[in-house]
Image (cartoon, rainbow, N blue to C red):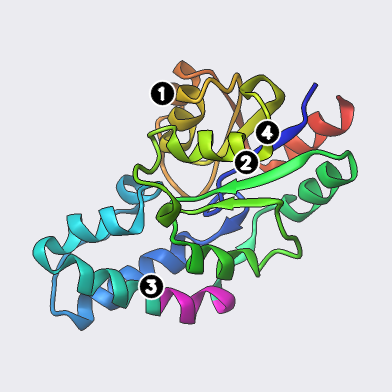
Amino acid sequence: MIKGAIFDLDGTLVSTAVVHKTAWELALKEMGIEREVNLDMLMGMRTLEIAKILANERYMELYEKKNNHYKELVKRLANPTCCAEEILWELRKKGVKIAVVTSSIRSSAQLTLSVLNFKPDLIVAGDDVERGKPDPEPVIKALKAMNLSPKEVFGVGDTLQDVIAYYRANIERIFLVISELNINRGEGVKYGAKIIQTLCELRELVNTS
């Protein structure tokens, strides 16, 4: 029996790819760094890890500037993904515990969540753990906080990092939702993920179970 659901945030519940890309580009430009921001390669990683890739020894400066730009842009440019709010409320009505596990820092995650008309039972953010996705640490942390076993939970994400983190945490029901990113769907299937086009598909599955 399903007692809990773990959702990724960016790209899964809220469409933020453009917001993150714009924030990184503005921060890099401000620092005089010419680097291409390839979200297909970077999304799913923690903000600090991305900053190290893009700015090397100046990563902390980039990290702070990017977060500041993101906070200014997110409420204006981000939107809930299709059926996100509906499935969250329907799960809550069924008594399912809901956790959001994100690679974003907590302050950014809370701003992103404000786009949704919903507050999850639990948030595990990138700055709450030592190792981010695809390491299972944040997923395991969520499971422990909800006092649930992997067999009692399903996981939803839009990147391979999400899928692998769920897989390594021994979650068997994994859903890979197609987002704005270009990902290798075959790799997701290899880790046991079911491919869904939108959360509306998952909503149908939940309502018929």
CA separation, marks 1 and 4?
A: 30 Å
Q: Residue at x 30, y 46 (%)?
A: 41
**Mark 3 residue element:** helix
Residue corresponding to mark 4:
147
Q: Is residue 75 magenta?
A: yes
Q: Position of residue 92 (x, y in %)?
A: 83, 46
Is 208 rendered above or below residue 55?
above
**Mark 1 or 2, nearer chain start:** 2
Please tell me which of labels 1 and 4 falls first in the chain.
4
Closer to the eye: label 1 or 4: 4
| Residue occupying image coordinates x 41% and y 56% | 127
Q: Indicate which disc, 2 or 3, sits on the residue closer to the N terminus.
A: 3
Characterize the magenta stretch by its predominant secondary structure.
helix
Q: Are marks 2 and 4 in contact (CB under 8 Å)?
A: yes
> How far is mark 2 from mark 4, CA to CA?
5 Å
Q: Residue at x 47, y 19 (%)?
A: 191
Element at label 1: helix
Q: Which residue is mark 1?
A: 187
Instruction: Please provide the residue range marked out in magenta.
Output: 69-76
- Looking at numbered disc 2 in the image, what kind of residue is underneath it? Ala
Q: Which residue carries the number 2 mark?
A: 145
- Kind of residue at disc 1: Glu
For the image, the number of numbered tags is: 4
- Dividing the picture into quadrants, the one containing residue 64 is bottom left
Upstream in the sequence, badge 4 or badge 3? 3
Mark 4: which secondary structure?
loop
Q: Position of residue 42 (x, y in %)?
A: 32, 50
* Labels 1, 2: front one: 2
What numbered label is drawn on residue 67?
3
Question: Do the CB atoms of the residues marked 1 and 4 lie less than 8 Å apart?
Answer: no
